[in-house]
Image: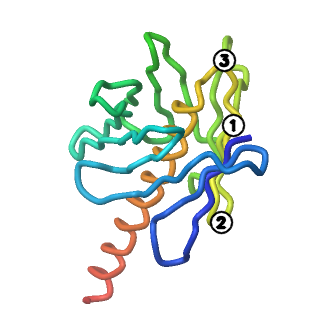
Amino acid sequence: MLTATKTSSLGHEYILTRDDSELGTLSLRKGRVGARIDFGDAEYRVRRHRLSGVHELLAPDGTVLAATGRVGRSWALSVSGRDFEFRRTAEADREYTMLGRGGATAGTVSRNGSAVSCDLPGLTSESQIFVLVVVLLRRRRKRTAAAVRGGLLSGG
């Protein structure tokens, strides 16, 4: 199981592990670059398009390795010409299920406190890390929107 665990309560830095072995790090960013991923000997980036809600995983040379549609309760991931469908299966974006043929569960992504884990057979490690980043970015966007609404409603 691949896991991204937050390294501090204030920052947006995560350590990537698989079965207790450290694989790399990821850092959530603001603006167009949604995240930077140091994995193996390479640095990948996740680009987020604000208006369309699309996320793209960029290789070190800038080519697009994977992309999502608009991320919501259900969304699709495109990798190497293959499409994978994800659907939220728990409230507050705590769990997503990757659907296989006939709508059967093919894998899961779960968020628990300061960690996000996934078990997504059939996807490369880079693609699985990308899915973790997409879930983390969605959570951050929803928390920011809630904070803004709370400030507006309270008159602050």
Q: What residue lies at 37% left-to-right and 75% top-to-bottom?
A: 147
Please tell me in which quadrant of the rendered image residue 148 appears. bottom left
Q: Are marks 3 and 2 in contact (CB under 8 Å)?
A: no
- In the rendered image, residue 65, in percent from the top left (x then y), is placed at 39, 24
**Amino acid type assigned to the residue bearing label 3 in the image:** Gly
Quadrant in which the C terminus is drawn = bottom left
Circle 2 residue: 113
Task: Name the residue carrying label 1.
Answer: 108
Label 3: which residue? 100
Q: Is 23 on the left-hand or right-hand side of 10? A: right
Q: Secondary structure at mark 3?
A: loop
Label 3, label 2: how far apart the Cα atoms are:
27 Å
Up the image or down, 113 lies above or below 138; here it is below
- The location of residue 153, given as percent across then percent down, is 31, 81
Residue type, numbered disc 1: Thr
Q: Residue furthest front?
A: 41
Residue situated in front as seen by the camera: 26 or 75: 26
Q: Nearer the viewer, residue 90 or 36?
A: 36
What residue is rendered at 32% in x and 87% in y? Answer: 154
Label 1, secondary structure: give it.
Answer: strand
Whether label 3 touches label 1, CB < 8 Å: no
For label 3, the crowd category at 10 Å Cα-Cα, with few meaning under 14, some 14 to 19 and many 20 or more, is: few
Q: Amino acid at mark 2?
A: Gly
103 displayed left or right of 13: right
Measured in 3D between alpha carbons, the distance from the residue under mark 2 to the one under mark 1, in whole angstroms, is 16 Å
- Percent x, y of residue 71: 41, 39
